[in-house]
Amino acid sequence: MTSVGSWIDAVASFDQFAAIDKVLPQEWRSAAVGTPRECAERWLEEFEAGADGIIIHACTPEEFEPVLAEYERIRPDHLFEDRTNRPA
């Protein structure tokens, strides 16, 4: 992995990602990966499991937009009725 020389998610080739896949333990992989729908469903799983929030990283705005659009379609408002997006 050190041979990539930058942020892996920004510059790695498919082959480099395949090599990384072989060395990262499964329990480290709670990230949302897959189609926009699969990623949105993964976000929802985190909230349903009791998460107060999630951190979204390792994607460009262009990659993020379809996931956010999908999440807006499936987001259960009742989970967030007593919350604010400005906790401070």
Image: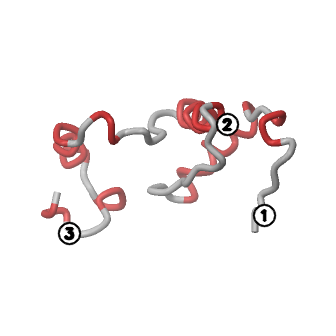
Residue, x 77% and y 58% (percent of image)? Answer: 85
Residue, x 13% and y 63% (percent of image)? Answer: 3
The answer to which of marks 1 and 2 sits earlier in the sequence is: 2
Residue that mark 3 sits on: 5
Residue, x 74% and y 40% (percent of image)? Answer: 72
The x and y percentages for residue 80 are: 80, 42
Looking at the picture, which amino acid does disc 1 mark?
Answer: Arg
Colouring mode (rainbow / by chain / secondary structure / one colour): secondary structure
Query: How many residues crowd around disc 3 within 10 Å: few (fewer than 14), some, or many (20 or more)?
Result: few
Looking at the picture, which amino acid does disc 2 mark?
Answer: Glu
Q: CA distance from mark 1 to mark 3?
A: 37 Å
The x and y percentages for residue 44 are: 63, 34
Q: CA distance from mark 3 to mark 2?
A: 33 Å
Looking at the picture, which amino acid does disc 3 mark?
Answer: Gly
Of 36 and 20, nearer the camera is 20
Check contact, mark 3 vs mark 2: CB within 8 A: no
Residue that mark 1 sits on: 86
Query: How many residues crowd around disc 1 within 10 Å: few (fewer than 14), some, or many (20 or more)?
Result: few
Residue placed furthest toward the left: 3
Of 74 and 81, nearer the camera is 81
Residue placed furthest toward the right: 81
Q: CA distance from mark 1 to mark 2?
A: 23 Å
The x and y percentages for residue 25 are: 24, 38
Which image quadrant: the N terminus? bottom left
Between label 1 and label 2, give the one nearer the viewer: 1
Residue 75: name its quadrant: top right
Residue that mark 2 sits on: 70
The answer to which of marks 1 and 3 sits earlier in the sequence is: 3
Residue 8: name its quadrant: bottom left
